[in-house]
Image (cartoon, rainbow, N blue to C red):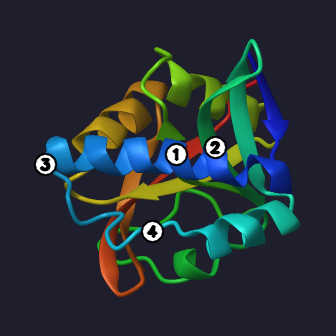
Amino acid sequence: MKIRIANKSDVDKIMKIYDVARAYMKDNGNPNQWKNGYPDQELIRYDISQEQLFLVERNEEILGVLVFIMGEEPTYQVIEQGNWNLEKEYGTIHRIASSGKMKGLTKACFDYCTERIDYLRIDTHQNNKTMQAAIEKYGFRKCGIIYVRNEERIAFDYIVRK
């Protein structure tokens, strides 16, 4: 298994992964997080242009995707019902999605990110119980509520202990 940066030629395969993830979320009590085709090709192309969209591959098959952004995340500037555990440079993880063909994909993504920075932030929809379980199992701590596109999200952070 390897994680690599995505390129323009990967867009169609990335869209298929997000289609699988949307169907999974809908079938598992979370029909509203990625509705109306979100994330769309325009956003995927933007993430690629910013070199922040990564692919999880095994034998050249794309098994998952994630967006990993180093630096300030505008939606994290305001947090309600809590606070971040640190105020320092951080990496943000967004839009993890799986083909469903690999166990431990989120852990592999989290490991990849913790190798690059020692403080991470992530958020997810209140109905995304699968992602919440993966986040908490890894050791992220619940920090409060943030808003993405005017929708409430549960915010977490993780401090790498070396």
- The numbered dot on residue 29 is 3
Q: Secondary structure at mark 3?
A: loop
Alpha carbons under labels 3 and 4: distance apart: 17 Å
Task: Judge left or right: residue 90 versus residue 107.
Answer: right
User: Mark 2 or 3 closer to N-term?
Assistant: 2
Q: Secondary structure at mark 2?
A: helix
- Disc 4 target residue: 38
Residue at 50% x, 16% y: name it: 102
- Disc 1 target residue: 16
Residue 48 is situated, as x and y percent measured from the top left of the image, at 80, 61
Occupied quadrant, residue 150: bottom left
Identify the amino acid type marked 1. Answer: Lys
Task: Judge left or right: residue 116 versus residue 22.
Answer: right
Residues packed near mark 2 inside 10 Å, few (<14), some (14 to 19) or many (20 plus): some
Q: Is residue 103 visible?
A: yes
- Disc 2 target residue: 13
| Disc number lying in front (1 or 4) | 1
- The numbered dot on residue 87 is none
Residue contact at pointers 3 and 1, CB within 8 angstroms: no
Alpha carbons under labels 1 and 4: distance apart: 12 Å
Residue contact at pointers 2 and 4, CB within 8 angstroms: no
Residue at 43% x, 77% y: name it: 79
Identify the amino acid type marked 4. Answer: Tyr
Residue contact at pointers 2 and 3, CB within 8 angstroms: no
Q: Secondary structure at mark 4?
A: loop
Q: Quadrant of the N terminus?
A: top right
Occupied quadrant, residue 145: bottom left
Identify the amino acid type marked 3. Answer: Gly
Residue 108 is situated, as x and y percent measured from the top left of the image, at 62, 23
